[in-house]
Image: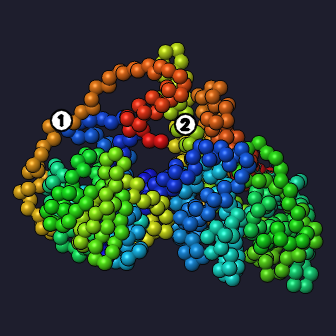
Amino acid sequence: MDIIVCVKRVPDTNEADIQISGNFINTKGLPFDVNEWDKYAVEEAVRLKEKYGGTVTAITIGDSESDDALRRAFATGADAAVRVSDDIFNGSDAVASAKILAGAISDIKHDLVLFGAQASDDGYGATGQAAAAILGLPYASLVIKLEADNGKIRATRELEAGMNEVVELPLPALLTIQSGINEPRYISIMGIRKASSKEIKVLSAGEISVNTAEIGNNSGTKTEKLFLPPVLKQTEFLTGSVDEIAVKLAQILKDKGGTF
Amino acid sequence: MDFEFNNEQRDIQKAVREFAEAEMSREYMLELDRTSTYPADLLKKACDLGFLCIDIPEKYGGVGYGLTEKAIVFEELCRMGAGVGMSLGGSCFGLKVLLNSGTEEQKNRILPRACSGEGLPFSGAFTEPDKGTDIVTFPLGTTAVRKGGKYIINGTKTFITHADISKYVILLCQTDTNAKPSYKGQTTFILENPLDKPGYTVSSFEKMGWQTSHTTQISFSDFELPAENIVGKENQGFYNVMSFLTEFRIETAAAGVGMAQGVYEKAVNYAKTREAFGQKIGKFQSISHKIADMATKIETARLLLYKAAAIFDTKHDVPPHISSMAKWYGARMAVEVADDAMEIFGGHGYIIENDVARFYRDTRMLELVEGTREAQKNTIAASILGRLD
Ligand SMILES: Cc1cc2nc3c(=O)[nH]c(=O)nc-3n(C[C@H](O)[C@H](O)[C@H](O)COP(=O)(O)OP(=O)(O)OC[C@H]3O[C@@H](n4cnc5c(N)ncnc54)[C@H](O)[C@@H]3O)c2cc1C
């Protein structure tokens, strides 16, 4: 099975005090990492390859700094990597990015295309879907389990309220991968060594099938404003027995996105 | 002159950091420390990922990087683990005596086992009860006497890290008791699974910190060793050990930088959150300047460390005074930074669960092992002043 996995290098904004300049996050001094969801997607791709044979190709959009993400894919077990890079790509929204990636993907033999379910920086959660539509591939989102079977793929999807759904898709197909589908392996020194001898193929806009009138600053959406909402002081006093308070507190933490 | 890590080095740093942050939680480190448990599970994982034998050539089962990359790994492991990081890195103590001075047969047989983790820990047994800094003025008390195809070993080695569990021991013995000067009569040997053999008794010392590695004493009583277990040439052992220690001191410098970085980060977080007199304590100049000093010292030690490592990697050798500078300063700096962190934490630093105290105890060992601060300064001074007779 030949698999393509799309990855993105994102600023790690978890711990940092975010600085905004204009409509951009000021990334100076911020640590960068591979988008969390993409790590799961790469791991899943490599596991599928290890199980069923074939190849894994990682693709990213960006300048040479994005090679970090591709080297990590190599170190995880990818066989080839492509970076599409052009100044004309700057300002692309999710759909425009999907057009660029679809342009690169369509020139590479593939049975399966994996994306992360979303990216932690702009959070569109749409690039994979859009690419599926452009490439005309059957598509499933938020995949938490994958099995290949006789030219088909069976994907378990994570729905709201703890429900799961199993869907079957013919290959080639495109899936977006939810975090937690696997436990991404640690990067080994042997993997890094191997990655260092592999070549990243760099393609410009002219070398892929994309209409430059539809991407970059010609994207459908334009960012108007990027800002941090003002901090509101909210204090809530919990009353009741210790047990009741504990239950209420746990519920509040859960509602606010805490994990246990 | 380039002060940046290259891409591979950054990838290595990131890989080890991810591993250490996930696998070496404060709770786990405290648990290992409290129970004086050697981190065997972590060792296995670290070996599987190529961390510990990163600088052993590929043909012997390593990954073939240099000392710079080894220092990066060691720094990250000690940043999270303090002494646990040292237990991991120190599990290869002595191994490079074999790499540098052993025969091809010995290296082919033993190094791949070490790199896989199965042959670790290694120990290096040089110190004796009455011979620590000075192993040159009088003959060693541990002797190896040739009898046919064997050597018979008698004597005592003390403060030997990991000898209660080590699979291999590099042992320094007196083979020629009449040699003048006496160190020209010293020879290195490799012991294989000595714990299974008669005439080999190990006892452990209780100590101040670094609980996850036991510090032991080995007594040899007519311990028999095949003559082919000699490492390098007979009566050249002193030189084998000195060149090994000159190199390993750079790794110990990395441990100092890593431990200091780890405890410094705790102090920075604390200074940003702890309040007194209606403000964050980091706003008090006495605290903020302490943090500025800590950061400056760590960066200074790091520069010395990577300079020493870079020299070693390009020349495959390093002037002893450079490695001594990196070692004593890296160790001293770590002790001072841990002390400052304790002060910033106030009483909370003295409480075990905040894990400043463990760094405080573990850093102190770094100044004593592989030659005390005084011994390092003697080396540096001799390179500057020569012999002033
Ligand atoms: C935790 C731990 C682990 C260790 N692990 C190992 C190991 O695995 N293998 C091993 O072989 N050894 C090991 N050692 C031993 C260590 O290398 C020695 O303790 C160290 O070399 C100092 O020797 P000593 O303790 O005998 O001190 P001494 O040599 O007795 O020194 C006492 C004091 O005198 C000073 N001094 C001595 N000579 C001079 C001089 N010429 N000028 C100025 N000052 C001087 C010293 O600096 C020190 O302050 C370990 C020690 C510790 C604490």
Callout 2: residue from which chain?
B
Nearer to us in this view, B240 or B203: B203
A225 to the left or right of A56: left
Q: Are marks 2 and 1 on the same chain?
A: no
Query: Label 2's element?
Result: helix
Q: Quadrant of the N terminus of chain B?
A: bottom left
The subunit letter for the residue under badge 1 reads A
Question: With respect to residue B60, does B311 lie above or below?
Answer: above
Q: Residue at x 83, y 71 (%)?
A: B196
Q: Residue A78: which quarter of the image?
A: bottom left
Rendered image: mark on residue B199: none
Task: List x then y, in percent, for residue A37.
Answer: 34, 54
For label 1, the SS is: loop
**Type of amino acid at the residue the image marks with label 1:** Lys
Cα–Cα span, label 2 and label 1 = 36 Å
Residue with the mark numbered 1: A225
Q: Nearer the viewer, residue A151 or B92?
A: A151
Residue depicted at 87% across the width and 84% down the height: B149
Residue sitting at 52 percent across and 67 percent down?
B65
